[in-house]
Amino acid sequence: MTLTPALFPALISAIAETITEQADAVTELDQAIGDGDHVFNLQRGIQALQAAAPEISGLDWPAAWQKIGMLLMSSVGGASGSLYATLFINLAKNSKDSTLSVVEFARLFDLAVTAVKQRGKADAGEKTMLDVLIPVAVKLQQDAAAGLTLAEIYADVRASAEAGVAATRDMLATKGRASFLGERSIGHIDAGAKTAQLMIAAVSSVLAQ
Ligand code: ADP
Ligand code: MG
Ligand code: MG
């Protein structure tokens, strides 16, 4: 399969669908240790991306990622908006060609996750979306380097995203709003980790088709 931005409309639809389906469950998580607006924030971004999907599908990857990042920056409020914008703008910055192998994407994704860490001054173990993004970036690079099939890579990536979400439950939040709760943040799954996992699963299932 060739990975081109022509896939973007299908990808963003799958993301919209899973976030809508899980909206109440995620909002419940976010109300426990955040301010309850995470799904609303994401949905604003998703709507902006769906409106621009026809245009994005005709771009090459660097231009598509830049456009996605800029739209997220301007449409999504909250911490998650600037962090996801950073991810996509960094993908745009480091990608040179319009064609994309899995090995090359794995390398770009790892760099982009590093940019998100820097932007949020956060790392693994702080009970955030990074507890999904970091293990996914690591697994993607390992699997791509090992030459696994796309189906194997997608299955592995989904599993590491799920493990990452589950691991946030017992973590003490040290970044973002949940950190204001201190010890009381322990025992709750992080909403931003959960939506990162849902979106990664949605993307994997479209790409696995
Ligand atoms: P806000 O907290 O500003 O209302 P959102 O509700 O949209 O923004 O997003 C909250 C999510 O963002 C958290 O659940 C967490 O996963 C993630 N997050 C918050 N701060 C950071 C950070 N410094 N680094 C990485 N992720 C973060
Ligand atoms: Mg919030
Ligand atoms: Mg907020």
Image: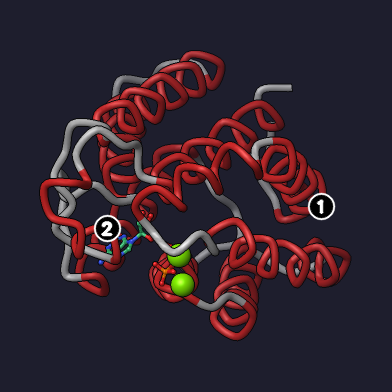
In this view, the residue in front, 153 or 47, is: 47
Residue at x 11% of width, y 47% of height: 183
* Residue of label 1: 9
Structure colour scheme: secondary structure
Q: What element carries label 1?
A: helix
The amino acid type of the residue labelled 1 equals Pro
Spot occupied by residue 26 in the image (x, y as percentages of width and height)? 54, 43
- On-image quarter of the N terminus: top right
Residue at 57 percent of width and 42 percent of height: 199
Looking at the rendered structure, the secondary structure element under dot 2 is helix
Q: Is residue 134 above or below residue 86?
A: above
Q: Which mark is residue 178?
A: 2
Q: Does the residue labelled 2 lie within 8 Å of ligand 1?
A: yes
Left or right relative to 198: residue 22: right
Q: Residue at x 53, y 78 (%)?
A: 77
Q: Along the polypeptide, which appears first: circle 2 or circle 1?
A: 1
Residue 95 visible from this viewpoint: no
The quarter of the displayed image where residue 80 is located = bottom left
- Where residue 148 sits, quadrant-wise, is top left
Residue 174, percent across and down? 14, 58
Mark in the foreground, 2 or 1: 2
| 90 with respect to 67 (left or right) | left
Residue 109 location in percent, x, y? 38, 52
